């Protein structure tokens, strides 16, 4: 194969997913990476929370059978362990629709380089649902890297090279068998045999000797498998089959909420790339509340009118921009107010989150309200209709 020289491509692929898949399924938040610079052998810890939105898109099935993944291009990191709600993930988990979960995953740097890493939730029938990601730099050398594991018998093996020689040996043996089988048939003349087939005498091409050779190959392959199985069982008498089960994990208990909110309507202005919606908010608490943030598809919009609520470059999410709220005054205890939220940002297009070209023109995400003490109330927007606006066309 020949082609033009290209530079290395860096991409995580999340933009290739449909907007509804990223905005209306799982929302990750409070994600933190333990660093951006590591040495080979260092542990990287990723913590955070995610919520499965209470209304699931009808385009995909909800099974709840999930696996929290740590993604990176190739085996550049080694998974040490993953926990959801403090339960170690040894198998697939069964999660609940509308539930909120806290997670932690630890990965060990394995190869030096500049790598994109992140978190994602893989769900049966829904596929990978990608969370926040960052780029990390790993220094050092892979030479000398080990992955020691203690076996059931108390022995310690290094999984970096354990069984490699055996794997190479069996790969070579089976490859030679395959090459010999192909060589036995491919070496025969083609054109003359094709004429015999065209004449309707294809059965004459298979001789008794050919059948004998085929039986020898078949019996030899079966015998080889049996002998290899006996040898392996003798060398490793104590084994545990790969476990195929599902662990049900209960969501976190609902946090006390001081707010009731409902989105009344929403529009997306295509020329200005602006999502705007009206939300009716009722403060059920005893402190004033402000809307601080809207998060969807790993993109965060901040109400920078709130003191200290500014963007931090260390955040793993994408900065969508400023969220303008009218009226901007806090919502007093017991008060009900309709807020107009406007988010004008090029990221709607850059992240391919515009909904007007999809069959279900809806959006989802999380609204974060806060009181003066910093206590949060989180409201899920799960299935809100969006009306696109294309501007006025002059005829």
Image: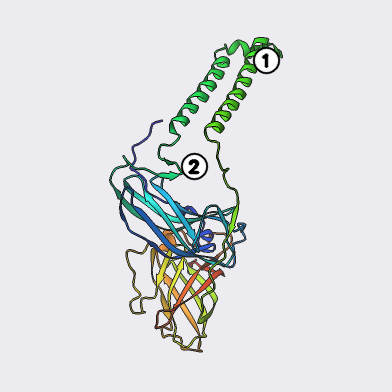
SS label for mark 2: loop
As drawn, 151 above or below 132: above
SS label for mark 1: helix
Which class describes the residues within 10 Å of circle 2: few (<14), some (14-19), or many (20+)? few
Q: Can you tell which of label 2 and label 1 is closer to the viewer?
A: 2
Quarter of the image with the N terminus in it: top left
Q: Earlier in the sequence, mark 2 or mark 1?
A: 2
Who's the residue at 40% across and 82% down the image? 373
Question: In this view of the protein, which residue sits in the foreground, 212 or 43?
Answer: 43
- The numbered dot on residue 172 is none
Percent position (x, y) of residue 179? 52, 20
Q: Which residue is outermost to the left?
A: 140
As drawn, 141 above or below 306: above
Residue 118 position by quadrant:
bottom left
Q: Which residue is mark 1?
A: 198
Q: Which residue is outermost to the front?
A: 154
Q: Which residue is mark 2?
A: 153
Whether residue 26 can be seen here: yes
Q: Are marks 2 and 1 in contact (CB under 8 Å)?
A: no
Residue 61 appears left or right of 309:
right
Asked which colour scheme the image uses, the reply is rainbow
How far apart are labels 2 and 1 at the CA level? 63 Å
Question: In this view of the protein, which residue sits in the foreground, 24 or 26?
Answer: 26
Question: In this view of the protein, which residue sits in the foreground, 162 or 179?
Answer: 162
Who's the residue at 51% across and 55% down the image? 89
Residue 10 appears left or right of 231:
left
């Amino acid at each position: 194969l020949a082609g033009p020289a290209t530079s290395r491509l860096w991409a995580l692929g999340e933009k290739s997913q449909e907007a509804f898949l990223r905005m209306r399924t799982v929302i990750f938040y409070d994600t933190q990476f333990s660093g951006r610079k590591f040495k080979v052998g260092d542990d990287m810890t990723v913590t955070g929370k995610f919520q499965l939105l209470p209304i699931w898109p009808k385009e995909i099935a909800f099974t709840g059978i999930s696996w929290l993944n740590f993604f990176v291009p190739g085996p550049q990191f080694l998974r040490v362990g993953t926990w959801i709600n403090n339960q170690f993930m040894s198998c697939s988990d069964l999660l609940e629709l509308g539930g909120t979960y806290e997670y932690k995953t630890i990965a060990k740097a394995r190869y030096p380089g500049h790598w994109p890493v992140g978190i994602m939730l893989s769900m049966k029938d829904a596929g990978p649902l990608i969370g926040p990601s960052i780029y990390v730099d790993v220094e050092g050398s892979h030479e000398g890297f080990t992955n020691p594991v203690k076996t059931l018998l108390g022995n310690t093996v290094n999984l970096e090279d354990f069984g490699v020689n055996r794997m190479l040996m069996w790969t070579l043996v089976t490859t030679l068998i395959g090459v010999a089988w192909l060589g036995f048939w491919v070496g025969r003349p083609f054109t003359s045999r094709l004429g015999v087939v065209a004449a309707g005498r294809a059965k004459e091409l298979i001789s008794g000797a050919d059948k004998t050779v085929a039986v020898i190959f078949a019996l030899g392959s079966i015998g080889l498998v049996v002998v290899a199985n006996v040898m392996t069982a003798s060398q490793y008498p104590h084994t545990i089959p790969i476990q195929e089960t599902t662990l049900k994990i209960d969501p976190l208990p609902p946090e006390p909420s001081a707010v009731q909110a409902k989105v009344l309507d929403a529009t997306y202005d295509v020329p200005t790339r602006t999502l705007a919606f009206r939300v009716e908010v009722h403060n059920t608490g005893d402190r004033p509340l402000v809307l601080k943030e809207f998060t969807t598809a790993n993109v965060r919009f901040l109400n920078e009118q709130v003191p200290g609520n500014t963007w931090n470059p260390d955040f793993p999410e994408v900065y969508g921009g400023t969220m303008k709220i009218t009226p901007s005054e806090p919502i007093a205890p017991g008060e009900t107010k309709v807020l107009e939220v406007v988010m004008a940002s090029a990221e709607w297009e850059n992240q391919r989150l515009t909904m007007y070209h999809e069959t279900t023109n809806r959006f989802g995400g999380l609204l974060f309200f806060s009181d003066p003490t910093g206590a949060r109330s989180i409201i899920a927007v799960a299935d809100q209709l969006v009306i696109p606006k294309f501007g006025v066309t002059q005829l």
